[in-house]
Each structure stands twice: as structure tokens, then as C-alpha cells.
Amino acid sequence: MNSPTHAVAVTHTLRLKVKPGAAAWLNAAASEVNAVWNWANEVSARAAQPFAGRPKWLSGFELNNLSAGGTQYFEKIGADTIQRVNGEYAAKRRAAGRCQLRWRVSRGARRSLGWVPFKAASLKRKGEALRFGGKTFRVFEGERLNGVKWQQGCFAQDAVGDWWLCLPVEVGVEQTAAPCEAVGIDLGLKTVAVTSDGERCEAGCSYRGIEQRIAQAQRRGHRHQAKRLHRRAANRRRDALHKFSRRIVDRYQNIVVGDVSSTRLAQTRMAKSVLDSGWGMLRQMLRYKGEHAGRSVSVACESYTSRACSSCGSLTGPQGVNGLRVRRWRCASCGESHDRDVNAARNLLRRAEVSVSVRGNESPPLPVPPRRAARSRRAGTESAGAAA
Ligand SMILES: [Zn+2]
């Protein structure tokens, strides 16, 4: 069963916190970046809707030509940053399909979070420190830059106001066969995720503990402290999801996740728990980590997975809103006792197996009435339309 290992290169973003000494410089550089962005916004909008002549959709290359020599107006940023801003602007505008994007704001309450992109050559290592734009930077955990080569990168500010150095770097990962064959993962509100083998990921409670302190800070008008607590909660949540997804990808070859969508539930009272649990984040992590490790990650339809018995397939489980409270139940037709979430995860796994099986599966597939499927599909396109 030992398949040969082989290495693949994947892109991974290094995030290093910049020591506070450089904050003032970066804030100033960020307002210059905003000026470039807003210039690109104005020029492109004018070219796309001219008073006379033919409309033109400016590319990043054309913006670079137009902004040539612009560095003389700026103290901090250089030509490479201006070109990166132009490139990013053109890409964003193309993706949005509009002739104008939002302005970047440098001051006031609606200030945009700082962002200073650059190209590889302009960020240099100098011993323990880094040089960029004639300024020396220090970062925490600088040793993580040892032996790392970057193509480009950016300084980015978070909501708390701290600056981070973000460098997309290529790292080699080894692909090996997983020890276990397959797993189903049920996404839920109480526990973020439960596997068909009974393992749980409890990332949701992280926010609940901090929630009261956030509310207290907001009542007292401590906005900065509230932002800090929000960031801490988000970090903890992401950390728990990273650990869980790593465990799953290391252990299983085929991974099946439920298709439950948080955008639809987020409009109801459940919003907080839903946003809390970060299903989308977990699915995304499983997808890219699985891809890197050579696993198959699929998404299966989640309807009826909590009602159907995973042993005999009959619909004997709890249903409706009251059913949400039932954590354990016994199947009336085969007598098997189930944990609600583990049963759902097993059903997901079986559903995926049935749809891809070439061996033919003895157990009957789970019922999905067409009415229900049509409705969920419609709701899906509606929410997609609303998001666009
Ligand atoms: Zn049963």
C-alpha cells in the first residue's frame, strides 16, 4: 500500500507582524498608495466614459505608461509600488466589471485599511532587519524568512491598526498516501464539524467566551479594545480550523463535506453561531490542503442526512426545528442507536460513495425528493445573485 512520495510546489503566504517602529512610515506610504489608486480610478473612469471619442478600457500596462515619472510626486513609494497598484487596480476592475471602483480613503472614520504592495527587488534583507523604500523594518519572528525567496508581496494593515508583511512564497510539500480511506464531515451549529468516525471540532466556542467582553468593551466605548478582542477570537477560530483540517488531511484519502451554506442561514437568528463556525473557511482549508497532499475532497448534498438512519436508510431520525435539540436517538426500524452528528456524517460519506461507486452499493441511496432539491437550487442561485 506504500505509494511513492513525490514533492509538489505550492504557494503559501508568510504573514509576519511588523514591529511598531515603522507604523508611521507605513501609514504615510499607505496614503501615497491611496493617491495612486484614486488617480487610476479617475483616469480609467474618464477613459471608459469620455466626453468625446471612443471609450477605452485601460489595462494595467497602459496605466503604467500613463503614470510614468509619477514617483517624483511621492516621498515614500517607488515606481515598483505604483506599478503594482496599477496592476491590482486593473485586475480588480476587470473582475468587478465596472468602470469605477471605490475610492481609497486616507483619513477619517471611513479610512481604508493600509496597503503597500511592492515587487521582489525592493524588499531586501539586511541582517535581522529588512530594507524597503529607504526605511529599515523589523518584524517579529524574522527567522521565518531564512532561506525564503519572494517574487512580490505587500505590507497590509489589519482592523486593529497593526501592520503585517505578507509574502507569497513557494514551498515544497511531499505527497504521501493517507493511512485511512474515507471520511464524511457533517457541518453543524453546535459543533463546527463532526466526522463519521466521531471526531469533533469545537471552534465555535472560542467566540462565545470572548463575546461578553466584546459587548462590555463596546458599551464602555472602548472601540480599540473591542477590535482587539474580535481579532483574538478570529485567530483562535482559524487556529482550531487549521488544526482540525490538518488532522483530517493527514489521515484520510477521500474527504466528503456537507454542502450547507452559511449565506442562507446567516439571515436568520442563527447568524451568530453560523458566522462563528466558519464552515466556508473549513471547506476552503480542506480543499487546498487536500489538493496539496493529493487527496480527493468532495462536497455532498446535506439534505435528509440527519433524518435518515445510517445503518438501514429509513427516515426515522428527528426532524423539524424541535428535532435540532435531539442529540441522540434510536432508529425505530433497525434499533441502532445514533449520535445525531456522527450519523449525518456517515450518511454524507455513503451518499458520496453511492454517487461515485463503480462496485455497486448494496445499501439503498438516501432519498432526495425533487421538490426539495429544486428549492435549494433556486435559493442557491438567488443568494449568488444577491452577492454579485
Ligand atoms: Zn435504522
Image (cartoon, grey):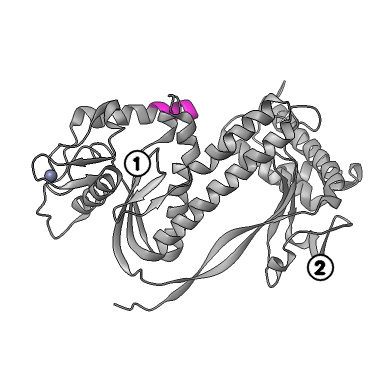
Q: Which residue is mark 1?
A: 259
- x, y percentage for residue 251? 37, 65
Residue at 53 percent of width and 37 percent of height: 208
The residue type indicated by label 1 comes to Asp
Q: Is residue 357 above or below residue 226?
A: below
Report the residue marked by disc 2: 128
Dot 2: element: loop
Task: Name above or below for residue 265 compared with residue 117.
Answer: above
Task: Identify the residue shown where x is 45% and y is 35%.
Answer: 274
Membership of 385 in magenta stretch: yes
Q: Position of residue 79 (x, y in %)?
A: 81, 51
Question: As drawn, is 185 to the left or to the right of 386?
Answer: left
Name the N-terminal-most of marks 2 and 1: 2
For the magenta stretch, what is the residue range? 382-388
Q: Residue at x 86, y 52 (%)?
A: 21
Q: List x then y, in percent, for residue 362.
A: 9, 54
User: What's the magenta bit mostly, secondary-structure-wise?
Assistant: helix
Q: Residue at x 36, y 54 (%)?
A: 199
Q: Which residue is situated farthest in the top direction here?
A: 51
